[in-house]
Image: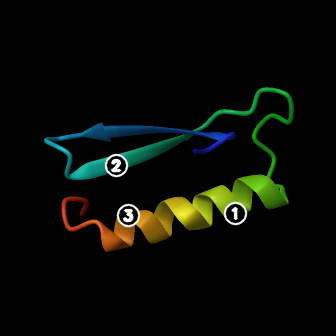
Amino acid sequence: MYTQLEIESHLDGKLQIAYLNDEKTYNSLNKTLLSELKNFIHDGSRDENVR
């Protein structure tokens, strides 16, 4: 799903953490990373199991 984000869930699925995972660009903010972060936040806001 994501190319520059690695997603993990903790605390019985209530907390969702995104790790930046692009060693080539040293996690610089580019259009792809910003788009993936936006989608990650949007998906999390719609999920009732994430706080």
Secondary element type, mark 3: helix
Quadrant for the N terminus, please. Answer: top right
Does 42 sit left or right of 48 as displayed? Answer: right
In the displayed structure, 51 sits above or below 1; it is below
Instruction: Tell me: residue 4, above or below residue 38.
Output: above
Pinpoint residue 27: horizontal percent, then vertical percent.
75, 40
Do labels 2 and 3 touch, CB within 8 Å?
Answer: yes
Residue topped by disc 2: 16
The quarter of the picture where residue 37 lies is bottom right
Quarter occupied by residue 22: top right
At 78% from the left and 55% from the top, the residue drawn is 32
Q: CB of mark 1 within 8 Å of CB of mark 2?
A: no
Q: Secondary structure at mark 2?
A: strand
Disc 2 to disc 3, how far (Cα)?
A: 8 Å
Give the residue type at disc 2: Gln
Task: Tell me if 37 is positioned left or right of 28 in this view.
Answer: left
Q: Earlier in the sequence, mark 2 or mark 3?
A: 2
Disc 1: which residue: 35
Total numbered labels: 3
Q: Residue at x 70, y 63 (%)?
A: 35
The circle drawn on residue 7 is: none
Which amino acid does the dot numbered 3 rest on? Gly
The C terminus - image quarter: bottom left
Do labels 1 and 3 touch, CB within 8 Å? Answer: no
Residue ID for mark 3: 44
Q: Secondary structure at mark 1?
A: helix
Compared to residue 19, the image places residue 35 above or below, namely below
Gap in angstroms between the C-alphas marked 1 and 3 = 14 Å
Q: Pointer 1: residues within 10 angstroms few (<14), some, or many (20+)?
A: few
> Dot 2: within a 10 Å radius of its alpha carbon, few (fewer than 14), some, or many (20 or more) residues?
some
Mark 1 and mark 3 lie on one chain; the one further toward the N terminus is 1
Q: Tell me where residue 11 appears, x and y as whole percent.
A: 17, 41
